[in-house]
Structures are given as structure tokens and as C-alpha cells.
Amino acid sequence: MTTLLIVESPKKAKTIQKLLGEDFVVMASYGHFRDLPEHELGIDTDTFQLKYEFTEKGRLKFVTIKAAMKKCSQVILGTDLDREGEAIAWHLATMLGLKSPKRIRFNEITKAALEKAIFTSEKINYHLVNAQQARRGIDRMIGYRLSRPLSTKLSHKGLSTGRVQFAAQALLVEQEALIRTHVSREHYTVELQFHNDERQWSARWMIPESVRAQVELQGNAQTNYEQPKPICLDKAIAQAAVSVSSVRVLDYTREQSTRMPPPPLITSTMQQQASMRWGYDPDVTMTAAQSLYDSGHITYHRTDVPNLAEEAILAIHQLAAKLGLPFPDKPNKWPTPPGAQEAHEAIRPANMELEDVGETEQERNLYRLIRLRALQSQLAPAHYDVQELLLEDEAGQFQYKASGRQLVDPGYLRFARISGAGQSDNPDEESDEDTPLPTLPALNAGDLVAVDDSTMSRHKTQPPRRYTVASLMRKLEKLGIGRPATYATIFSTLSRRGYSKKEGGYLVPSQICELIYQVIYPNFSYSFLSYTRDMEAALDSIAKGELNHVALMRESWNILSEEEQGFVTVPRPAGIEDPADSPTKDCPKCGRVMRAINGRYGKFWSCSGYAENKACEHTEKFDPAVISINK
């Protein structure tokens, strides 16, 4: 009795075949073996059913799978745990004619995990399938219906647009606008120095609300821009604040502070860390992670949940005890982010004892990072002794704050500093806990303290920093736009189509990226960041069975149809010629009008029949010296 087990990746199939032995035939579907047609919408706009066809490789693979099925007694579907995997399982069940398909789910490729999954096989979750279909259908509507008009509008062949893609472009363009319009202004800080009880310490002026600079923002920037730290632009006020000779103690506090280790990696933080540490683009990171998972070295790498399974925590505690590392009495837990899709655990090694695995440098680097973060996540926290003094000048005009902090018990830091695994997920935000501070004297409220020295420093405001790959991913995640597992495709599109380029590690939008933004925003609903965030919430509701996927697709279609009517009236951005004003001539093949179009490699003649469902695809080289203009 032989069982056919179908997974997605051939490497994964090979790993599982070795574990399960000759009673199983393990085959791969090579991912999505069916998809929407390449050259048509592929959606029935009456029923909103998606029209699928075999991919080129998928057809051949399906024939092989169907032939193997005839020789086996049963079929089990073991595709990935996410919505894409669920959809592939549904496609397989549909095309193979499985009446009661057996669906298994496993988070790691080990013999124990596979045997448990086979013993507890389940059914296909059609809510997840519908959520995947809704996402695919809505993204196809936007991309298919608007990409060609966009190319025509901007006289630039091969342009594209999409729901999450445009959100990433908008963030880049709006950040660039903030940088260009930034006006540098002088601002001031004040610091007081004290020497008492053989201690040297300082206090910073707390800038009052009344003198803080404000930033006025427009458009999408109102929802995504974060206000900088408060600054004082008034030199006279700062001079008064620095001129005090003594201050009175308003309050003194001293307490123990706990610093938890960072959580184990999830999809988003894995991509961000790999980008910050080694400059890996998301697609490089996800390819390496996929290979590690398919080889059985790590758990499933598409996950939103920053917690580990109980058996994994036990294995980590055993390893920590072996290495002499401190761990807490109760496991460390972290809150699950809002909108998290998947219920399976964070990314970790399948075997914590293995220190170094992987076939490439990228895989080895990523595995070591995953292991270090998983291990340190279950170590004991660090403890600090923290003091704080709140001070005020004798006239009651200005307030100052002093802070002191000493490390009492390093906890996980003892391991993190040695391993290099303690790096913050956000290098743009310096942690105050990483800066050593002197011990403050224990003073009582009302005590008067003489100021030994004071300094007023002059600064200039700096423009916002451009996004890096890591910080843009972090921003998208924070705004609830897209899913971390899809970021690799988005960033690849931005780079491949020339919408952004890297300069000194930062992402800079190209001119065509900015022109696309000018045409699309705010003329289409999907150009608003709130739309994309709300769409993700709606897709989550479909996945939970709370919303009908056809209703969402129909609503999206109707809105897009209405907004598309106004596409031709969208003002043309400065510097872009109107295609209607470009040179024309008759097409020698069909007689339609040919226009001179700006392509990726320069101007060329293109038949207008191409826009009519590719009725005529005739093109010619453009020679500016020989132009026949039909007026």
C-alpha cells in the first residue's frame, strides 16, 4: 500500500522521501502549477470566478503526478501552511478529482512531525483558499486594468502598478518630497553639569510644549510620517535656560528595570536583520530560508507569531543549561502582532544542537542568526538599577531631567554580546539602555543643587533619512500594508522595473516612479495607504469566514471601474508629452494609426491595435529623420 504525498518544492520532496521511506512516493507540484492567464484578465466579471490555466512547467508536472496517482492507494496533500499553500492544495484536489482530499500540515520537516501530521490529517480550509483567491483577483484587477493606460499616459512602455507595490512607491516618493522641501533651521539644546558626592552627572533641559517646532504635512504623509524629537528654535529662551545657577529637586526615583531579550525571528524581522547585517535583499533571504526549510533545518519561515512551541522551549532550556547560560523559571512570551495570519510558531532550528548548516554562505549566515535569536529569546532578562531626577530652576520657568543606570545582572546580554545576536531589529532607533550612565546622588524633594557648569549647543535640523530596505519593510509592516512573505516580490519589482535604486544603502525613487505617483495619487482609492491596510483586514476576515470573497471582489471591481473612467482626465505630469501629440503614421500591416512611443531602450513605432486586445502587434524602429505625420 503506497501513499502519494504531494508538496510544493522538489528539494522538500527529496528530504521527506528520505524520512518516510519506500511506503511513500513524494512528489512536488513546483509551487502554483495553475495560475491566471498571462494575456487576459482571467476573471468572470459576472460571477467573479477566477479562470485558471496550467503554467508551462505546471502542465508537464501535473501529468506526471496524475500518472503516479494511479499507482498509489491514497493521496495526501502536504503543501505549505500559508494561504498560498492552502490554495495549491485546493488546485491539486480539484484537478486530481479528489472527493475527500486529505490535507496534512507540519511546521518542520522531521520524521516525528511528519508522522504526527499524517496521523492527524485534516480537510482543506476553504476560507484560506478564498482569501488567497480574493487577493489574487483584486491585485490582478488593478494591475491588468491600469498598467497599460498608465504606460500610455506616461509614454513609457512596460509600466506596472499594484496595490502593495504602489504603497511602497508612495512611501519612497513622499519621503523624497520631505527631503527636498526640508528647510534647515537652527535649534538649541541645554545641558547642566553637577559635581557632588564625588560624582559627576548632568541634566538635560526638557523643552516645553509651547516652544516645540511643528511640521505641517499633506496627503499620505499625514498618516505615515513620524514627528521628530521636540526642538527649540528660540535662542533667547535657550539662553535663559542655560543661565540658571541652581536648581531645586522636584522628584527623585530609583527602581529596578528589566530588559527582555529580543523575540525569536519571524518573517519580517528575519528579512530586516539579514538586510541590516549582510545587505541581503528580501528575495535572497527568502530563497535561503526556503532552502533551509526544505532541507529540514528550520521550521516554516512564513510566520507572524513571535513565540515558540513548548517542546522547542524545553530543548532550548536544556541547551542553555549545558552551555551554562541563565534562563527564567517561566518561558518568555511576546504578544502576537495585530492582524497576524498564521498560528504556527516563530522561526527556529529543527535541531537546536546543530550550530552551523547550509549549502551557501547566505544559508549558513541565516541559520546561525535564526539559531542565536531562538536561543537568546528564552534566556533570562538583564536587570538594571535606574535612577531619575526631575529638577526645576528657582523661578519655576525651566525643568531638567537627569538619568542614571547601572547594569546589575547581564542575563541574556552575557551571551548576546559574545555571539553578536543582540543587535536591535531597528538600527535607526538607538536604545538608551545601550548607553552607560553615571550613578545619580540620592536627593530629596526640595533640595537645592548648585549648577557647576552649563552648555548651550547649537544644531541644525536634518532632513528625514531615506528608507533602507529594512526600514521600508518595517514601515510597511507597521502600517499593516501587505504581508512580510510578499515583500520579496515587491522589492524585486521596484528594482527590476527601475522604480528605485540604491545609493549608499538607501532607496531612491526614480523619475518614472515619481511620475507614476503623480498620475495615480489621489485619483484611485488604492493609492491611499489606508485602503491597502483596510484591504488586508478584509482579507483576514475572509480567512476567518467572516466575509464573502466574491462580495469583496465585486465591490473592488465596481470602484475601480468608476475611477478608471476618469483616468483620461488626470492632469499629465510636467515634462511628459501627450501621446496624442506624438508623431503618427499608418501601420503597413493593418492600416491603423502607429504612434512614436518612448520605450525602455528609446523611441519606437507601435501600432494602436496593440491596445485593442493585441489586435495588431506591429512595431518598427523610430527614425527621427524620416517622419510621416498624419494630421
Image: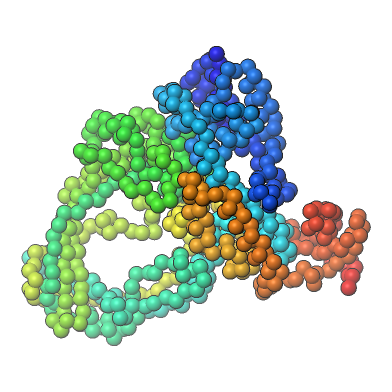
Question: Nearest the camera: 410 or 614?
Answer: 614
Quarter of the image for the N terminus: give it.
top right
Residue 207 position within the rendered picture, expressed as x and y whole percent measured from the top left: 27, 76
Q: Tell me which corner region of the image, top left, top right, bottom left or bottom right, holds residue 512.
A: bottom right
Residue 495 visible to an observer of this rendering: no
Task: Give the answer, above or below, for where 538 lies relative to 1.
Answer: below
Q: Is residue 575 left or right of residue 124?
A: right
Nearer the observer, 427 or 271: 271
Left or right of 37 in this view: 15: left
The image shows residue 91 at horizontal and vertical percentages of 61, 35
Name the residue located 87 percent from the left edge and 63 percent from the top edge. 593
Side of 478 relative to 327 (left or right): right
- Which one is in front, 196 or 281? 281
The residue shown at (15%, 84%) is 395
Q: Is residue 121 above or below residue 50?
A: above
Residue 340 picture location, percent across and down: 43, 48
Looking at the image, which residue is at 51% across and 71% down? 219
Query: Can you name the residue that lies furthest to the bottom here?
Result: 236
> What residue is shown at x 26% (from left), y 33% (from top)?
317
